[in-house]
Amino acid sequence: MSDSSEFLREGGGPGSQETTPVAPGLLRAQDNIWGSRAAEMAAIFMVGDGLIGLLQPRRHVDLWKDNALGTEKLVQPFVDRPGRRRLYAVVQIAAGLALATRQKR
């Protein structure tokens, strides 16, 4: 059995304690975390897609060149050009790492 005093509750009752209100600035900081999370997810996508494009350029481009909801035009410059896809992959990885590095949290 644990001591009930280690789990403090607000609102009265046994083990209750006064709580201090949260500063509005802290709430704004918590809201801003979603922008950082979105940037982090974009960075992860860029690095991962870049690694696959670097290691398996033909297979990766072939996957997206036909019936891929509009991505056909995006990968067209890389069809049958693995060297070009690898160069783009290096840029993609560097950009993803730079984006992740800029995140404060």
Image (spheres, rainbow, N blue to C red):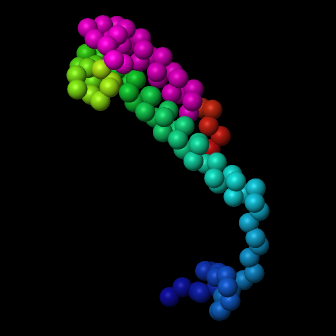
Give left or right: position of 72 versus 31.
left
Figure quadrant of residue 98: top right
Residue 80, percent from left and from top = 26, 8
- Is residue 93 magenta-colored? yes
Height in image: 96 above or below 33? Answer: above
Q: Where are the magenta residues, as a range?
A: 73-100
Residue 72, percent from left and from top = 30, 20
User: Residue 82: in sight, yes or no?
Assistant: no
Residue shown at the point (61%, 80%) measured from the top left: 7
Residue shown at the point (44%, 28%) measured from the top left: 47
- Is residue 75 magenta-colored? yes
Figure quadrant of residue 35: top right
Furthest residue toward bottom: 14
Give left or right: position of 105 versus 67.
right
Residue shown at the point (65%, 40%) measured from the top left: 104
Height in image: 87 above or below 31? Answer: above
Number of numbered discs on residues: 0
Residue 105, percent from left and from top = 62, 44
Of 98 and 38, which appears nearest the observer?
38
User: Residue 53: in sight, yes or no?
Assistant: yes
Q: Main secondary structure of the magenta part?
A: helix
Residue 48, percent from left and from top = 40, 30
Residue shown at the point (28%, 11%) measured from the top left: 79
